Image (cartoon, rainbow, N blue to C red):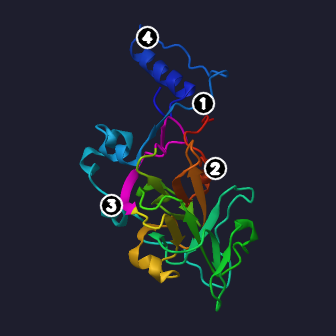
């Protein structure tokens, strides 16, 4: 059945054909299978495999001539020329997230970009109130949250000199604040090169559709600092930048581990629908 088809439309098409040819074949009615399995079929990829696979463009649902393009090659041409700004840095960001969201850290931006960079900092959550210095919180629950000011975090992977790949997935954000938001970054993920931590699936958990390579990254210290590049100048100078969905906002960070309990992926999510689909362990036990 074609996407968008229905039992009614099939019946109507058949009736129309029958009027032209009385001997026209009438298909059996379309029926819903109430006992169909709810599990998705999925495959896990290493980040490099997604872009070097013989069927890379098919896997990512791209035209063949886009195979070698990176995120920076196409984003500016696709994105709608507007984004959300925060009028007063003393006030919270307008981002709204499920209060029960089980993320590991939070990060914010006012320039619409997040920096992924190596820097010497303590593992944990950071917050800087207006006119104050950065304050460190080992426990994210002790941080003040979305109350204004600026937010950043540091993830100590415990794996100095490991090689990582930064990827970004694009998606149509639909209507935001009464306007067509168009194509934006749904999430950005730093994935360890030797880890199968990118999900290709037949359902809603698929991460490969419109997935693009942003950069190849090495973390000499083993630590990753995430933040607005203007709030953390030293990070902005040597960091890899990813546009942050709708622009200014407060965004969740998810840290995923492999079967050996090693960090294998760090993801910043920019759209609510993706936040509920994040996996904290790879391989995931099951996809529902």
- Please state the extent of the stretch shown in magenta in the rendering: 196-217
Give the distance between the C-alpha atoms of the residues marked 4 and 2, in whole angstroms.
45 Å
Kindly give the residue lying farthest to the left in the view shown. Answer: 65
- Residue at 69% in and 55% down: 102
User: Residue 252 appears at what percent x and percent y?
Assistant: 61, 62
Query: Mark 1, residues whose alpha carbon is within 10 Å: few (<14), some, or many (≥20)?
Result: few
- Residue at 42% in and 9% down: 22
- Residue at 57% in and 69% down: 154
Q: Which dot, 3 or 1, sits closer to the camera?
A: 1
Residue for badge 1: 39
Residue for badge 4: 25
Q: Earlier in the sequence, mark 4 or mark 2?
A: 4
Badge 2 element: loop
Give the distance between the C-alpha atoms of the residues marked 2 and 1, in whole angstroms.
16 Å
Magenta stretch: includes residue 204: yes
Q: Are marks 4 and 3 in contact (CB under 8 Å)?
A: no
Query: Mark 3, residues whose alpha carbon is within 10 Å: few (<14), some, or many (≥20)?
Result: few
Q: Earlier in the sequence, mark 3 or mark 2?
A: 3
Q: Which dot, 4 or 3, sits closer to the camera?
A: 3
Badge 1 element: loop
Badge 4 element: loop
**For the C terminus, which image quadrant?**
top right
Q: Earlier in the sequence, mark 2 or mark 1?
A: 1
Give the distance between the C-alpha atoms of the residues marked 3 and 2, in whole angstroms.
27 Å
Q: Are marks 4 and 2 in contact (CB under 8 Å)?
A: no
Q: Is residue 246 left or right of residue 239?
A: right
Q: Is residue 107 left or right of residue 180?
A: right
Residue for badge 3: 74
Q: Taking 146 as reference, is 132 above or below it?
A: below
Q: Nearer the viewer, residue 20 or 34?
A: 34
Residue for badge 2: 276
Q: Which dot, 1 or 4, sits closer to the camera?
A: 1
């Amino acid at each position: 059945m074609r996407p968008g088809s229905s039992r009614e439309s099939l019946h109507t098409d058949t009736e129309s054909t029958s009027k032209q040819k009385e001997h026209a074949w009438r298909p059996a009615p379309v029926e819903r299978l109430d006992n169909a399995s709810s599990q998705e079929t999925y495959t896990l990829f290493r980040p490099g495999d997604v872009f070097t696979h013989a069927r890379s463009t098919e896997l990512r649902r791209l035209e063949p001539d886009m195979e070698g393009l990176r995120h920076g090659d196409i984003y500016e041409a696709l994105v709608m020329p507007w984004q959300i700004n925060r009028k007063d840095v003393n006030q919270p960001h307008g981002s709204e997230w499920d209060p029960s969201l089980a993320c590991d850290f939070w990060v914010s931006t006012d320039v619409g970009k997040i920096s992924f960079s190596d820097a010497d900092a303590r593992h944990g959550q950071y917050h800087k109130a207006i006119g104050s210095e950065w304050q460190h919180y080992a426990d994210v629950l002790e941080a003040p949250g979305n109350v204004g000011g600026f937010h950043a975090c540091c993830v100590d992977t415990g794996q100095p000199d490991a090689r990582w790949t930064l990827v970004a997935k694009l998606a149509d954000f639909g209507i935001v604040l009464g306007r067509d938001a168009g194509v934006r970054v749904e999430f950005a993920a730093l994935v360890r090169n030797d880890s199968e931590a990118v999900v290709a699936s037949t359902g809603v958990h698929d991460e490969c559709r419109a997935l693009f390579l942003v950069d190849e990254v090495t973390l000499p210290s083993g630590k990753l600092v995430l933040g607005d590049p203007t709030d953390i100048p030293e990070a902005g100078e040597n960091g890899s930048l990813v546009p942050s969905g709708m622009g200014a906002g407060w965004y969740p960070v998810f840290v995923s581990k492999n079967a050996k309990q090693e960090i294998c992926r760090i993801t910043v999510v920019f759209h609510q629908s993706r936040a509920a689909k994040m996996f904290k362990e790879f391989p995931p036990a099951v996809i529902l």
